[in-house]
Amino acid sequence: MKYICLIVLAVLLKHADGTDTIMCTDPSCNGFCNEDIGCSCASDETKTCMPTACDFIYVSQCCPSGYFWDPSLSCCSDEVMCDPPCLSDEICASVNNVATCVCNNSAYSGKTIADFSPSLSCQSNIMVISVSQCLLTYLGYDYTNIHLLNETDSCNIHYSEIINNNRVESMQLKVQSGWCGNTMMFDSSKVYYKNSLYIGIQNKSVITVKPMLFNVTCSYNLTIQTSLIYGIKPVESLHSLAENGTSSFALTMSAYKNPDYTSPIQAEDTVEVGTYIYLGLFVYNADGTAFSLRVEECYATPTSEPLDVNRVYIVRGGCAYTNDVESVVEENGKTLEARIKMSMFSFHNQNNVYIFCNATLCPNSPLNQCDQV
């Protein structure tokens, strides 16, 4: 194995061998490096030189043809080295004299289509399907030729990324009924979004596999729970006793000071007992054309524990529950937003009031009872 480093003896030997290679630091060279042309001498830009440092994104450009940058030794070596290192299913190879990470076919020796298992990530607003580039290539498929049955460009934006130290090709699908062929089904507890992904074969003279079509499905809970991320600090006015006071879809709740729901109550704020506060609940990423948000119940506790038995109900069965605290359900079951007005109160000898709500997503259909009680 050859190394060319900043060692005077190595420079002398190179000159003695009669080669043109010279260190960039040699006074007779006074070399410089450029990402377009690599490293060359200022005295003669046609003459390449060996650098002692390499700051290029593609480090192979630092070294002359046949040599590759070794970051551990800060010099050029005839050993093919990739920087950054290759992934777990890749090997480093010289491709047109450039150190390149390529698929390591031996890692997939003996694999068949039965071993192909795409990764599916069901997020609140998108579904992400990911397939192994190297495995598909080994099996005879073309990972760049993937698309939904709806081949419109706007429906088929895929990209390369690294997951679990493997290079994959990923595609995002919106969680929305009818989007690019999405179909939606639901039962009493979940909603399901489905689509199909096509993977083409490599353009080779000998074809050993057929194009692949597989279905992807993500399910989401219709029942969701949320709470304020802080406790409201109720305080009584001077004429009273002075006392300081999860699902696949993301449900957010905020408390506001004003009836137009624009001035949020902050964690450090105190709220006077007897004044109105306004609770806004939102599901930002659900399919608003298919569902509405219905708040089933809201209750308050003196602690941040939702199972605390010491609780005061604000909403029950989708309706205002006024046995203990004045409340009004201003909007519920019509959109992906619910609004609740309540009179502030405090628990005896407690500084904070914690509010929890349970909600469900109702299908928007002629039989929808979401806004009814």
Image (cartoon, helix red, strand yellow):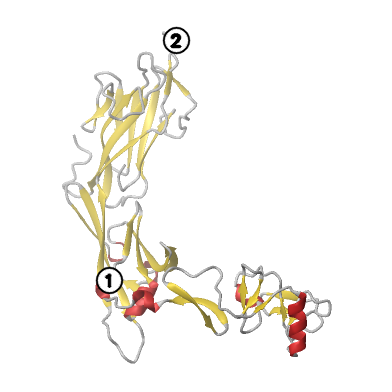
Q: Quadrant of the N terminus?
A: bottom right
Residue 153 is situated, as x and y percent measured from the top left of the image, at 39, 71
Left or right: residue 15 versus residue 310 is right
Residue positioned most to the right: 27
Q: Identify which residue, 200 or 86, lies in the foreground.
A: 86
Query: Which residue lies at the image location 30% right of the left edge and 21% below the top edge?
Result: 326
Regarding residue 283, the answer to whether it shows in the image is: yes
Regarding residue 332, the answer to whether it shows in the image is: no
Left or right: residue 6 versus residue 264 is right
Residue 107 is situated, as x and y percent measured from the top left of the image, at 37, 74
Query: Which residue lies at the image location 17% right of the left edge and 50% below the top edge?
Result: 187
Residue marked by disc 1: 115
Under mark 2, the amino acid is Ala
Nearer the camera: disc 2 or disc 1: 1
Judged from the image, the secondary structure of the residue bearing numbered disc 1 is helix
Judged from the image, the secondary structure of the residue bearing numbered disc 2 is loop
Dot 2 surroundings within 10 Å: few (below 14), some, or many (20 or more)? few
Dot 1 surroundings within 10 Å: few (below 14), some, or many (20 or more)? few
Distance Cα–Cα, label 2 vs label 1:
69 Å
Residue marked by disc 2: 242
- Earlier in the chain: of badge 2 and badge 1, it is 1
Q: Identify which residue, 351 or 319, lies in the foreground.
A: 351
The part of the image, by quadrant, that contains residue 3 is: bottom right
Q: Are discs 2 and 1 less than 8 Å apart at CB?
A: no
Circle on res. 46: none
Residue 284 is situated, as x and y percent measured from the top left of the image, at 37, 47
Query: Which residue lies at the image location 57% right of the left edge and 80% below the top edge?
Result: 98
The part of the image, by quadrant, that contains residue 321 is: top left
Q: Quadrant of the C terminus?
A: top left
Looking at the image, residue 223 lies above or below residue 92: above
Under mark 1, the amino acid is Asp
